[in-house]
Image: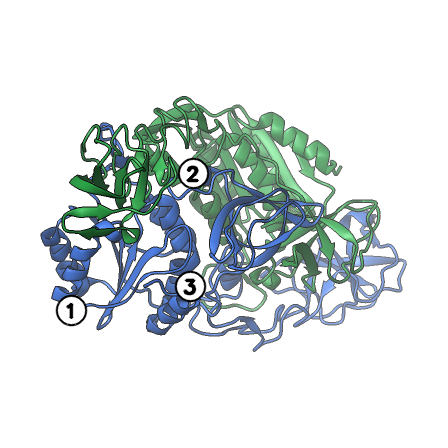
Chain colours: A green, B blue
Amino acid sequence: MKVSRHKAKEILNSIACSPDTEEIDVRESYLRVLAENVLTERDYPDCRKSAVDGYAHIPGCENYISVGETGAGRKGADSIRGDETVFVMTGGNVPDNALAVARVEDCTVENGRVFIPQCKNGENINNIAEENMKGDVAAAKGSVVTDGLYPVLFYLGRGKVKVYKRPKIGIFVTGDEILEAGEEYRKGFVYNTNKYILESMFRKYGFDFEYAGHVKDSKEDVEAAFEMMSEKYDIIISSGGISMGKYDYVKEVFSTCGYEILFSRTAIKPGSPLMAAKKDGCTFIGMPGYPAAFMTNLVFYIIPFIKKCYGYETFENEEVFVVMGGKTSSKEGRFDINRAVVAAENGVLKAFDAGTQKTSHFISFAKVNALLLLDEETGSLSAGDTAKAVFL
Amino acid sequence: MKVSRHKAKEILNSIACSPDTEEIDVRESYLRVLAENVLTERDYPDCRKSAVDGYAHIPGCENYISVGETGAGRKGADSIRGDETVFVMTGGNVPDNALAVARVEDCTVENGRVFIPQCKNGENINNIAEENMKGDVAAAKGSVVTDGLYPVLFYLGRGKVKVYKRPKIGIFVTGDEILEAGEEYRKGFVYNTNKYILESMFRKYGFDFEYAGHVKDSKEDVEAAFEMMSEKYDIIISSGGISMGKYDYVKEVFSTCGYEILFSRTAIKPGSPLMAAKKDGCTFIGMPGYPAAFMTNLVFYIIPFIKKCYGYETFENEEVFVVMGGKTSSKEGRFDINRAVVAAENGVLKAFDAGTQKTSHFISFAKVNALLLLDEETGSLSAGDTAKAVFL
């Protein structure tokens, strides 16, 4: 009944929607995905500019006559004579035949003459197109507008930018034992955690979602939620209600609502109960209720899936090799995902087991920053062994 | 005139404000800083729970009489007889004297009897306090509510949480050569980039700021901006207008407005023009106008400074050692901050120079993810050398 993780990923990749594109204001583009190659629209810089505040001149004289000053965005002298100098502020246009700019702090002005130390030709002048040439690809289609790229789009003078449209994602949580934050505790109950796992992880990636609320553990309520949501969303994500004990009525709801179940368990630990189902344009992802299992499935399967739906060129998790700083337990023949704290030590990424790997435990996520991917053939690892890791 | 980077950091640390605290709804706590140790309020779990959907029983019989079922948050049987079993759903309360839970998929039901395979005592039962004991510190004062900690606060049942108040930060940009996104390009002009560097970097850290706009390069306009902002903000950050050519009038504005200049240049490249000034409760940070210099100063000095003002326990940048994958140029006797792309290769962090380190270039920030900190004694580095890096 369990599908392999490879098969599950293959199925998810095959059903990921291909997003449409839209043109948006560049100010709205943070964490969106480019649907165009962003080209440099002109040479950078497009005129010779001074790199410093200083005197533009032609090296050779002992001192110079100051014939004015200019700053960034202002039109200065087009050319100077051999014994003339123009004071140019940083970023200002350098006269066409000037060959160097001397830093103001290195020059002295005496009796109306500017004494300039010996400069090399080209000194402190930024040449046309030295940074980028018109037509260069500054950022490729499928790139995410991250912290670094976002201001670069402004630097390049973009007013609008073509990005992929975002799929509409709706979330609901099931479970009669779920309390909401602020509600009084009742013994044996648990607080809604999975909604907030999604909220923080999605916020990091700039994924949008609407929360459709907390649905009671009954066939009627789950069916009503599905009927409403299938119309409205491209992707529906639920938490809980799909393990063996409760599985049957969800299956029933699915056939009533016309969903085709693609898989309902995958061979990973923690969190083997993970369901994917499909109906026309709508994908349903049924996540396990345990927060640790929810988080693990989210990172391992769902974030890459949503990245693909968002138009990311590189949507799979980046797996890095780390060196174990201590032991971590894993069962041979099973694919285990263990929580770990990874820190750089003298250029080497060292991983330390979080101390507990039980599916029912979650508090360690306050400190862990990586998941170790331990293949079927791996078994337990000791200090010095290498492991594959995905950063959270 | 230039202060050392150590002295500049010492000054910034000494003027960082000590934040007050406030109690907020846990739903508003993402990226805020804890002003309390978050303790586990009860044992986790606080009753014996089933880790799976299955049959709770006392091992020893060949088959069992089913005497009901229970789920998470529901009160089940307190105790069972030796030949009785209760079906318990994942997270459900296990009868006090049950010694194991067998997975439902491993059991068979025939003629009203449940056939359960041999279980070990304790199998699939989560014991009281096995995850955390009441009073354990789940997260320490001064921790940031990151992706992992945020849902843990909900898991722990917190409705409210005590955090540090945020300083009020106001930003303005100077420069007559600055165009805004969407404005038509004019030769020699540059687009406002620094506002958006701040926006994306601050968004990542959850820092708030208000944008006071674009101020003209005149004494009157800068003075008016200062008068208005000094009253309103704890921290004012400006971009541009403090290099040698324009420095004098800013200095004049400062004395008119009653600010004490703490330093105006620091010994780093790129971006030596960085000004810090203070007046009563208000700190002014004057950042250089070049985007690369702005970004570098922001990462090296200003984000740690603001983290301290936000109450971060650990506010200095984490410096990691990386191994050079190629060469990077640096001048001995100078502290250089070079842009680089760092990637993990077989557990080792390898750094590659961004190709250009000129202060006037910025487009490479679309791809770089780290800054190399190259001390005065370092000089240029080759493949295989180690370097200190700060991730962006």
Residue most extreme to the bottom: B135
**x 59%, y 27%: residue:** A15
Circle on res. B5: 3
Tell me residue B253's x, y (percent).
Answer: 14, 60
Circle 3 crowding by C-alpha within 10 Å: few under 14, some 14–19, many from 20? some
Select label 1 or label 2 by which is in front.
1
Select label 1 or label 3 by which is in front.
3
Q: Secondary structure at mark 2?
A: helix
- Classify residue B210 as left or right of residue B331: left
Q: Nearer the viewer, residue A390 or B111?
A: A390
Type of the residue with mark 1:
Gly
Q: Are discs 1 and 3 located on one and the same chain?
A: yes
**x 84%, y 49%: residue:** A332
Q: Is residue A342 visible?
A: yes
Circle 1 crowding by C-alpha within 10 Å: few under 14, some 14–19, many from 20? few
In which quadrant is the N terminus of chain B drawn?
A: bottom left
Chain ID at mark 1:
B
Type of the residue with mark 2:
Leu
Chain ID at mark 2:
A
Circle on res. B258: 1
Tell me residue B313's x, y (percent).
Answer: 47, 70
Based on the displayed image, in which of its 4 quarters is residue B95 positioned?
Answer: bottom right
Which residue has dot 2 on it?
Answer: A149
Tell me residue B276's x, y (percent).
Answer: 29, 63
- Classify residue A148 as left or right of residue B236: right
Q: CA distance from mark 3 to mark 2?
A: 28 Å
**x 18%, y 46%: residue:** A113
Q: Secondary structure at mark 1?
A: loop
Based on the displayed image, in which of its 4 quarters is residue A319 positioned?
Answer: top right
